[in-house]
Amino acid sequence: MSADSSSNANRAQAKLAIEKILKQYKVSVEHPEPCLTEAASREANPGLDDTSLAQWQHLPFVTIDNPDSRDLDQALLIERSSDSDFRVRYALADAAYYVPPGSALFAEALQRGVTYYTPLLAAPMLPPSLSEGLVSLNPNKKRRALVFDMKLKPDGTCLNTTVTRALICSQAKLSYASVQQYYDALQSEQPHEYHNTNWSASLRLLRQLGEILIQRARDRDVIPFNRSEAEITLNDKGLTISQRARVRTEKYNEQISLLCNMQGAEMLKALSQENDVLQAIFRAHDAPLQGRLNTLRKNLDDFASKAQLPEQWRWKKEQSLADYVASLSDTAQHRGKLLAVERQILVSNQASEYRSEPGRHHALAASSYARFSSPMREIVGIFTHKELLEALGQQPSTYTVDNAQAIDDDQLRDHIISVANQSRQTQKQINKRIEFIALQSVLDQDLAANDDVRRKGIVMGFRKDRIYVDCESIATDLKVTTSDLQAQYKTEYQLDDVSAWPLEQHAPSWLLGDEVEISVVAFDAGKKRFQLTLHKP
């Protein structure tokens, strides 16, 4: 077989594997005919001539997203007034206008819950003619938007927020990487194509305000975890997995999105007190259970003792976890230990979930949080936009719907919450399955290599008979079992929560945060797992 034929075969095989996974979870890429018919009618009557819309299409809004994103939910514009206050206008795609309850589009979106993403294709919640076309905030196209208009003091305190339906026209589709390059050019006083644009001032203010909001989050005791992402792509050998570090621009954009969602939640809470029929949905994140925190404190104390670390590595009772993490050394010598500690904190947390009642969001240290910022990709966003608009005395949509298909909003909210929580879990399971395919492709190549391929990693945790090793080059955890170690070192191993040690002294022991080298020696097809070896560097 030629190289090109082999490459095409690998690509086709990867695509088929992903399509099979989606089918197993009953996720369809295509939309039924009634949805496509409605989508076509929306395109024919897009509602862009609505005289009630604020005419903001001349303003220099821009979108910032991944370079391959086609469903653009948000555009932003940041200005500064004469009194040095910030004015942030965060425009969200007006999906609630095009997808009212009672429509075929809404019924299908409710069934799907979210847009499901994979490395090769997406199964969009809305038909592409809407999610990538009419509703998406594409550059140089007039679009309806729900705009959160927020006024902030110079220290980032939000003074007030209003919501306006507007007609906008994004002036550019930017990527996180390109905006980061612009910031780097500003820092080094180098030329850049963004310098003389009419939206460059907004980008500069995004960086300034982003840093302020990051510090405010730190002041609220939000833990600034060192996050990287696994990036799965397709090459000639099939799916591959690697690590993608987040650039600072992503954090700035994230802060604006979080601000919008926190302000939206506060609006829903306030309006609920005056409006008995408002059916709000919130995203709550409960604090870790006290038992888990007690175990975490004990494990961190054991870790500090066994690793002979300075006193600062012990989490003191009077310290918040954020202050504790901030006090730890982030030098090259201690980098692995810091990342391992952060992982221990993360696994002690509970999962967030959608609820009908407002609740504190522990990870954000926010009194309440809602999801307004992904209206084309989450059914929660469409419904939340609709409920907010109704509470503000506005008609969410003017399109005719089949009233016979209408569901009581109270029942509808419960259904949406159930679907939204379940679809998040489904996306996680899909990601896990696809990640294994990519991991298998990479490790198969290691097995086929003539030399022993050793990859650098960090010991992140211990559980039952497994050691979890974060392998930096492939951005995922590999699980080394005690049976793997016994086969390698010819002795049994015992584990606790922070270490593993051999029964015979000739073999090495392993501790949380250790920098290690890991390699694959075989694949057990029956158990669908790789046999691994672990080495001291």
Image: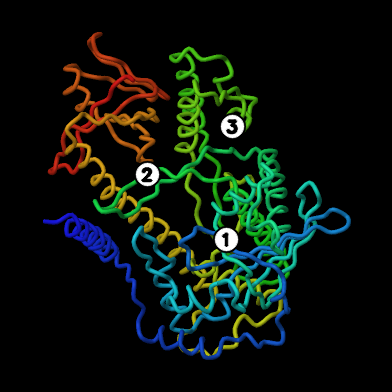
The tally of labels here is 3
Of the 4 image quadrants, the one containing the N terminus is: bottom left
Q: From this view, report whether residue 82 is shown above or below residue 289.
A: below
Residue positioned 72% across, 75% down in the render: 58
Please, what secondary structure does the residue beneath circle 1 have?
strand
As drawn, which residue projects farthest toward the front? 191
Q: Amino acid at mark 2?
A: Ser
Q: Position of residue 182 (x, y in %)?
A: 62, 51
Vertical relation: 391 (above or below) 401 = above
**The C terminus - image quarter:** top left
Q: In which image quadrant can residue 8 be found?
A: bottom left
**Mark 3 / mark 1, whichever is N-terminal:** 1
Residue that appears at 50% across and 27% down: 338
Q: Which of the numbered marks, if any, corresponds to residue 242? A: 2
Q: In x, y percent, where is residue 448?
A: 16, 39
Circle 2 — which element? strand
**Residue 135: percent from the left, percent from the top?**
54, 76
In this figure, which residue is indicated by the disc labeled 1?
A: 174
Q: Which residue is mark 3?
A: 321
Q: Which mark is residue 442?
A: none
